[in-house]
Amino acid sequence: MLKIGAHLIADVIAHARADHPDEACGVIAGPAGSQVPTRFIPMVNAARSPTFYEFDSRDLLALYREMDDLDEEPIVIYHSHTATEAYPSRTDIALAGEPGAHYLLVSTRDEGAGVGTSDTDVEIRSFRIVDGVVTEEPVEIVPMA
């Protein structure tokens, strides 16, 4: 199960809406070994595409160095789908390289139709992706402490 603060979910949704119609992507880091997401890190979609996301390799290297310096790890890797449900695509599955991470997807497919303007209307789902096997997991959104 992914247990995550409501403020972090709000940040992910805001990023997905801001980048729509392109896919948004980013990381939520947390203390190494904790599985507790704490630090929201929006990234630039280097692909600038409505159907694909890609982290810039230099930005990703800098992020991993920063997380290492702070004794953090990627707890959540998130991105949005702009025209489909919040479920990993074949490409998402093939590129999933963090077996310990939660893969959080947000669908902004209804944004253009004026639907999904409330955070409670947005489709959010989380998955574990290990060796090409996708397992959906519950998401528990907790209030800010």
Image (cartoon, grey):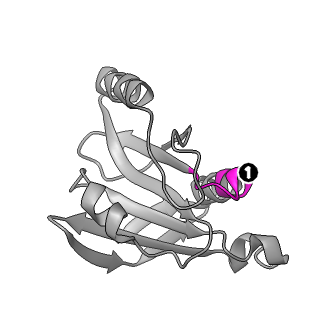
The stretch drawn in magenta includes residue 78:
no
Pick the front one: 113 or 16: 113
Is 36 above or below relative to 29?
below
> Residue 36: horizontal and vertical position, in percent?
38, 51
Where disc 1 sits, the SS reads helix
Please indicate, yes or no, whether residue 117 appears anywhere in the rendered image.
no
Give the residue drawn at x 32%, y 22%. 65
The x and y percentages for residue 145 are 59, 53
Residue at the image point whose x is 76% and y is 71% from the top: 111
Q: How many marks?
A: 1
Residue bearing mark 1? 18
71 relative position to 85: left or right: left
Quadrant containing the N terminus is bottom left
Residue 44 in view, yes or no: yes
The quarter holding residue 126 reads bottom left
**Magenta-tinted stretch:** 15-24
Which residue is outermost to the right? 114
Q: Is residue 67 left or right of residue 46?
A: left
User: Residue flagged by tag 1: what amino acid is it?
Assistant: Ala
Queried whether the magenta region covers residue 22, the answer comes back as yes
- Counting from the top left corner in percent of width and height, residue 103 is at 38, 61
Local crowd at mark 1 within 10 Å, few (<14), some, or many (≥20)? few
Q: Quick one: 139 or 90, which is closer to the camera? A: 90
Is residue 144 toward the left or the right of residue 71 in the image?
right
Name which residue lies at 21% across and 56% down: 99
Taking the image as shown, residue 94 lies to the left or right of residue 86, namely left
